[in-house]
Amino acid sequence: MVEFHTSLAWEIGHKRRKLTAMKVAVCVKQIPDPADPGALDEATKCLKRDTKLILDESDSYGVEMALQLVDAAGGGEVVLISMAPNSEVNGLRTALAMGADQAILVSDDALAGSDALGTAKVLAAAIQRAEPDLVLAATESSDGYTGTVPEQIAELMGLPSVTFAKSIVAADGTVNVQRQTEAGYDDVTCPLPCLVSVTAGVVEPRYPSFKGIMAAKSKPVDEVTIADLGIDAGSVGWAGAGQEIVAVEEAPAREAGEIIEDEGEAYQRIVSFLDELKVI
Amino acid sequence: MSVGTIWVLAEVAEGGVASITHEMLAKARQLSDDVVAVFGGDGASIAEEVGAHGAGSVLATGDLGGALPGPSIAGAMAAAIAGGAAPKAIMVGTTYGGRDVAGRLSVKLDAPVITNIVDLADEGGLVGTEPIFGGASNVKTKFTSDKPGIFLIRPKSFEAEATGGGAAAVSALDVPDLGATGTAVVTNSFVEASEGPKLDEAAVVVSGGRGLGESDKFELIEGLAAKLGAAPGASRAIVDAGWVPYSYQVGQTGKVVKPDVYIAAGISGATQHLVGMKGSKTIIAINKDAEAPIFGVADLGIVGDVHKVLPQLLEALNARG
Ligand SMILES: Cc1cc2nc3c(=O)[nH]c(=O)nc-3n(C[C@H](O)[C@H](O)[C@H](O)COP(=O)(O)OP(=O)(O)OC[C@H]3O[C@@H](n4cnc5c(N)ncnc54)[C@H](O)[C@@H]3O)c2cc1C
Ligand SMILES: Nc1ncnc2c1ncn2[C@@H]1O[C@H](COP(=O)(O)O)[C@@H](O)[C@H]1O
């Protein structure tokens, strides 16, 4: 018999605000700088996270989209939601500097080792606090790229969702989304409140201005623990992760190839190579 | 040898059953003698094709009436499992629809998803292999509970294989009331025009990256692709820059390609690009930076300027007729 996870029912009495004031919650992950190659921790088999974390570039699209939607609605609020170790706010400050109004940060030692489902449970509970009209996330994070967290959040909150948005327009209590498909895109309509995950290219993220950076320093960051969110430590972190890494192996490397410096004739080698391969 | 019942999420593409579905069926067949295709649509429309690829039966929801399929399929799967169905594993493709199904189902079963899987093996329990660092290492993961194991499988991980089986028997999979979660509806579908071979099926792929310098220079890629009967592809950098549509993107968030020949021009070879093309039989790279990581996987590497090499190459090929 399978136990059903009780969905965190969308708060009863959640009043659908007029779209003259739209509250958007944006999930922003703070990650190690992808420019650093990164390494696995021998003991835990997890990516090491001992450096200062930065805003995942993938989430800067969600932040920008939220700012534009609030702007188009003629008012409202952008609330950032993040789960990160060691009270990390560096990435949040970047997003606040872009113009977001406030942030909720969940930081708790018990969260180390959380898998995507555990992460989604925590984020869903934190989002619930903000009572947003719309939740935005990126289709996948740059470091974890499971790509399942947004849809898990939607299901936990009992919300409809549209993933892979390449454009979003909100009006009259619904969002109209162009959703990326294999062959092109679909137009999808979805009532608010809902969750939308955005692709890169949905909007062009702004750079924080100097004024924005200064203002970000005094914007509120509400730091909470899992106890504050009413989450049981056994359902998240290592304890809650229902999966286990059994091995990490080196993949067989490709054999080194032939490298030539072009002195004006290298194209001939490509031609002969294609010839050998019988492509031409 | 059989690990127990395996469900495979069936998806369609351009009328037929999607190649990712065929690939997963082939793998499922190796692991189990009870392979069930689960489909969000009319089961009869795919019964023959999935049967020929190894599915013994089809569980189908019937027409979903325009609803985005994820919540309906996940809801129907969870309801069947609550009603006694006991798949050992549920294989879902890493596709737009597949991720929605896996995410929703994971919450309904309160069970995790193992993602980005390129291989699945029975080692006293199913173990999934996920490549990391652009394929330099492989991480092997298993589930720790008895719940059905949800695996998100990357395209092109397995060889599709027709088993010659007859049409699979179709039975109905009921979609329960989804409440608010089922309210996203598709109102229109747009297909971007494309000519020539499909990117993920072409025997030769010619891809361009930021090294082309500007949008107009993608012509060089298109010209060479046309000459070689190849599909043009791209790095994410130039897709994000709007030079070419997203459907051209090769890599972790784009298409996985395994052509006989992959030509990368002005592409650095970021790990996220490599995971999408590293499985190509032969790789040719042109980059002006001798240190570019793409040379680490290239069989033939040309350290040179794409603006010189590509026009010369095209001219030489044209001269051959
Ligand atoms: C979560 C996530 C997912 C991603 N998914 C993908 C994905 O699916 N696919 C993908 O491609 N990327 C993906 N990326 C992006 C990836 O990290 C790289 O940013 C991207 O691949 C770089 O594209 P590029 O090689 O065209 O550009 P660059 O990295 O800027 O490289 C350009 C190259 O061109 C060379 N060059 C410049 N001028 C010339 C010249 N005249 N002649 C020859 N060579 C020249 C340079 O030496 C350089 O090596 C992803 C990133 C993240 C964070
Ligand atoms: N720890 C986190 N904090 C905030 N948002 C997150 C976190 N993990 C995932 N997300 C959101 O979910 C998206 C997809 O993540 P993933 O499923 O890990 O690929 C990310 O791009 C974020 O928008």
Image: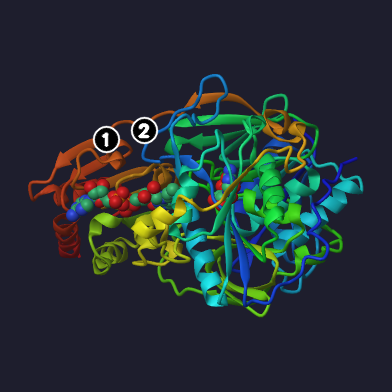
Q: Is residue B180 left or right of residue B224?
A: right
Q: Position of residue B289 (x, y in %)?
A: 20, 43
Q: Amino acid at mark 1?
A: Gly
Q: Is residue A154 left or right of residue B203?
A: right
Q: Quadrant of the C terminus of chain B?
A: bottom left
Residue at horizontal 48 percent and vertical 41 percent from the top: A31
Q: Amino acid at mark 2?
A: Arg
Asked whether the beta carbons under mark 2 and mark 1 sit within 8 Å of each other, the answer is: yes
Q: Position of residue B220 (x, y in %)?
A: 24, 64
The chain holding disc 1 is A
Q: Is residue A26 above or below residue A145?
A: below
Please name the residue that numbered disc 2 is placed on.
A254
The chain holding disc 2 is A
Q: Residue furthest left?
A: A263
Q: Is residue B277 left or right of residue A274?
A: right
What label does residue A257 carry, if any?
1
Closer to us: B111 or A32 = A32
Classify residue B313 by image quadrant: bottom left
